[in-house]
Image (cartoon, rainbow, N blue to C red):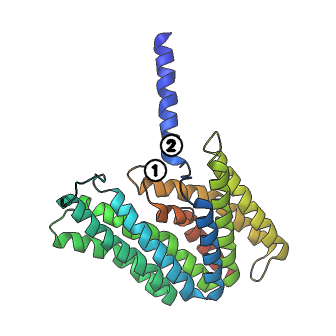
Amino acid sequence: MATASAKAASTKAATTDTRRRLLVEPDITGPRVRMGVLWFLLAMAAVTSGRMWISLLLGAVSALAGYQITKAWGPPRRKRKKGTKRSRGEDAIKVDARVAAGVAGVVPLLAGYSTGAAGAGLILAPILVIGYHATKGGTFPSAVPTLFGAIAPALAAVPIVLTVRLNLWAGLFLIMAVSLYDAGSFLYGSGAGARWEGPVAGVIGILAVTFTMAVFHPNPFTPVSVALSGAILAVACPLGQIMASKFLPVPDAKARGLRRLDAYLVAAPVFYICATIITS
């Protein structure tokens, strides 16, 4: 009996740990709501102003995310006495983080120029990172944090820019739906008893945008294509948050730039493919 109870407790603990790895608890420290509103207003203004503006905004956020992802894999930050120098490991990870930020920030700008340039950037990004580490005598495992920082934000940011290039209404649909998902997931998830409640609230936000778009169905969308796109976003946004956790040493690592883009990691590429089919 005692063995069965211990086994049940162990299973429950493992399940809880898995949920913590997959479903991120929102960080409510600081002016999160104001920053979220500011991000939404900037994104909407950038989308309606043209593809270069949205590529500049996403390039800046992508660069920040790349820096923070790579830095999170470095040695833990420690307090130093006045006048003491940083360790060699701290200096090395800072340089790697800057390289990741540079690569992650440039690729969305290439997407603003052309689709071909975006593809070339995504192909060259890992080559540049591995080449940089090779010049330092590093191995592939040592390059992985920099690869994560350079590639993960770009995978989210580039399809957003390409969607805006493809069709303005498609870009607005994507950003409004994901922004409402983020808002619902954060506002409800931060005070919820279970971590799945936040994503569920976010999906309700997506459904609200989908219903509005289905009513007006601006060209090239139809009510059916809007409904299908909304359903895809409802599944893809939570998956993006889960995937983002895999790019960090722990899910709650300080990477706010990545968390600004995490819901787009799966949603943006899939939505861009759908928008391409709809507009063809």
Mark 2: give few (<14), some (14-19) or many (20+) Cα within 10 Å: some
Residue 162 place in picture, x, y as percent: 56, 81
Which residue in the structure is indicated by mark 1? 251
Q: Is residue 21 above or below residue 275?
A: above
Question: Mark 2: which amino acid?
Answer: Arg
Q: Mark 2: which secondary structure?
A: helix
Which of the 4 image quarters holds residue 72?
bottom left
Is 9 placed left or right of 183 in the picture?
Answer: left
Q: Is residue 185 above or below residue 146?
A: above
Query: In the depicted view, which residue is nearer to us: 244 or 224?
Result: 244
Distance from disc 1 to disc 2, alpha carbons, whole Å, reads: 8 Å
Question: Mark 1: which amino acid?
Answer: Pro
Can residue 277 be seen in this snapshot? no
Which residue in the structure is indicated by mark 2? 20
Q: Residue furthest left?
A: 137
Q: Residue furthest front?
A: 82
Query: In the depicted view, which residue is nearer to us: 145 or 82?
Result: 82
Mark 1 in CB contact with mark 2 (< 8 angstroms): yes
Q: Residue at x 59, y 55 (%)?
A: 238
Can residue 135 be seen in this snapshot? yes
Mark 1: give few (<14), some (14-19) or many (20+) Cα within 10 Å: some
Residue 15 place in picture, x, y as percent: 51, 35
Q: Residue at x 46, y 50 (%)?
A: 252
> Is tag 1's residue or tag 2's residue first in the polypeptide sequence?
2
Q: Residue at x 39, y 62 (%)?
A: 69
Which of the 4 image quarters holds residue 240?
bottom right
